[in-house]
Image (spheres, rainbow, N blue to C red):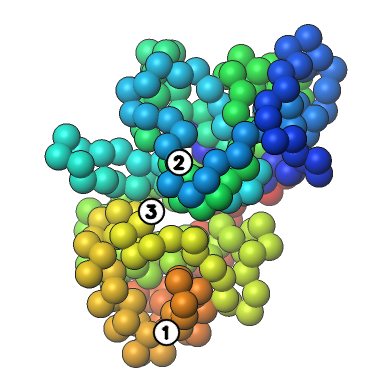
Amino acid sequence: MTGSHLQTPPHARARPRPRRDGDRGSRPGKVLSSWVRRYRAGAIIALDGEELRTAFVVLSGWLAVSKLTRDGQKQIIDFALPGDFLNPTSADNATVAVQIEAVSPAIVSVMPVTVWHRLLDKFDDLRALDARCRAGVQSRWSERMLRLGKGRAETRIAYALIELYVRLDAIGEVSDGAFHLPLTQVHMGDFAGLSSVHVCRTMQRLSRQGVIRVRDHMDIAILDMDSLSTIAGIDPATLADQIVAMP
């Protein structure tokens, strides 16, 4: 569903300007620029079950990909970060089976799936990157699913922080072990399968133990990666090799 590390075009336009006749002759960045849209934090970009055959490339900001129960409970399946792409069209080739929401102000290239497929057909390097990214997504989903099903609260939070750290480090958004998450504790709870209260208590406990530092609104610093990795049950370097697909 998602992949990463497409280069953000330098002059993103505020509104989509389709170039259906010129897609094949354009570099990917130019095509992405032709379909740009801007979203405020909290905007719903796609609804579960909606008829939509659209691909998304995140140029800036964060998107949450989620499923909701009938009584409104949410499970965040993944976050799409800058450079990631999404093709959420389900097997019926007509609808999406997830909800996509901007959790921060975001700039996204929103194009018909047919345009995205033409890009993959035209550019071998992009098609190869797409395949590696899909494999990386599967790897991180598998690791997180294991902890959602079998891990205690500290394990789930520790793994979530390391996964996000690894992904942010790959796009240059980590400095000396510190990074910003544009998320609330509710978001983290929906990602880790915990209540916001449980997230708060768990992060406070990790902070008291000197493993992490949390400031302001989810400014995170990992102070003891060895301890956090032990709690998560994962080696960060191995995880990076498995989930980060570099161009």
Helix, strand, or loop for circle 3?
Answer: helix
Label 1 environment density (alpha carbons within 10 Å; few <14, some 14–19, many ≥20): some
Asked if the residue under mark 1 is in contact with the one under mark 2, i.e. CB atoms within 8 Å, the reply is no
Name the quadrant containing residue 114: top right
- The amino acid type, in three-letter code, at marker 1 is Val
Helix, strand, or loop for circle 2?
Answer: loop
Vertical placement of residue 87 versus 243, above or below: above
Location of mark 1 (residue): 211
Observer able to see residue 54 = yes
Spot occupied by residue 216 in the image (x, y as percentages of width and height): 46, 77
Helix, strand, or loop for circle 1?
Answer: loop
- The amino acid type, in three-letter code, at marker 2 is Ala
Position of 53 with respect to 197 (left or right) is right
Position of 10 with respect to 95 (left or right) is right
Say which label, 2 or 3, has the lower sequence index: 2
Alpha-carbon span between mark 2 and mark 3:
29 Å
Q: Which residue lies furthest to the left in this view?
A: 71
Alpha-carbon span between mark 3 and mark 1:
21 Å
Closer to us: 94 or 151: 94
Name the quadrant containing residue 160: bottom left
Label 3 environment density (alpha carbons within 10 Å; few <14, some 14–19, many ≥20): some
Instruction: Tell me what residue is drawn at x 30 percent, y 54 percent.
Output: 190
Closer to us: 139 or 56: 56
Instruction: Tell me what residue is drawn at x 22 percent, y 53 percent.
Output: 149
Instruction: Tell me what residue is drawn at x 50 percent, y 18 percent.
Output: 53
Position of 198 with respect to 245 (left or right) is left
Location of mark 2 (residue): 43
Observer able to see residue 130 = no
Spot occupied by residue 73 in the image (x, y as percentages of width and height): 21, 45
Q: Say which of marks 2 and 1 sits in front.
A: 2
Res 143 label: 3
